Image (cartoon, rainbow, N blue to C red):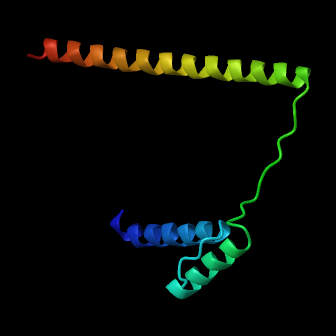
Amino acid sequence: MLSCLPKTLALVAITTVLLLQINGISCFSSPSSLHHHASTAQQNGGWHRPTTQLLALSPEEENELKQVQEESRLKVLTDRRKTIRGILKAAEGSKNYRLENE
């Protein structure tokens, strides 16, 4: 496992640099170039971020979205209950095992 650690760290570093560059953040810029970018942005009226325009949903689409959200919520709750039941069952089994082998 330790032999693959340098490769993993390298992949994490490369991924981080790529994500920063995609988001417009330069990792290896000098402080003077960063100052130049900041002053240019202030002159242009501030930092501009891309925006997303949301479209209004029709009542039919809104109802469908609410139904999907409710189904997802119920599925999450059901999965949580199953997980909790499984954990409680395992804990009870461990307790019974310890009691039998004292």
What residue sits 83% from the left and 46% below the top? 53
Determine which quarter of the picture holds residue 96. top left
Residue 101 image offset from top left, x and y in percent: 12, 17
What residue sits 83% from the left and 23% below the top? 62
- Residue nearest the observer in this picture, 71 or 87: 71
Q: Quadrant of the C terminus?
A: top left
What residue sits 61% from the left and 66% below the top? 19
Report whether residue 7 is seen: yes
> Up-down: is 91 above or below 11?
above
> Up-down: is 93 above or below 52?
above
Residue 26 image offset from top left, x and y in percent: 59, 76
Left/right of residue 59 with respect to residue 6 in the rendered view: right
> Up-down: is 85 above or below 32?
above
Determine which quarter of the picture holds residue 66. top right
Tally of numbered tags: 0
Q: Quadrant of the N terminus?
A: bottom left
Left/right of residue 13 with respect to residue 93 in the rendered view: right
Report whether residue 30 is seen: no
What residue sits 69% from the left and 18% below the top? 70
> Up-down: is 42 above or below 53?
below
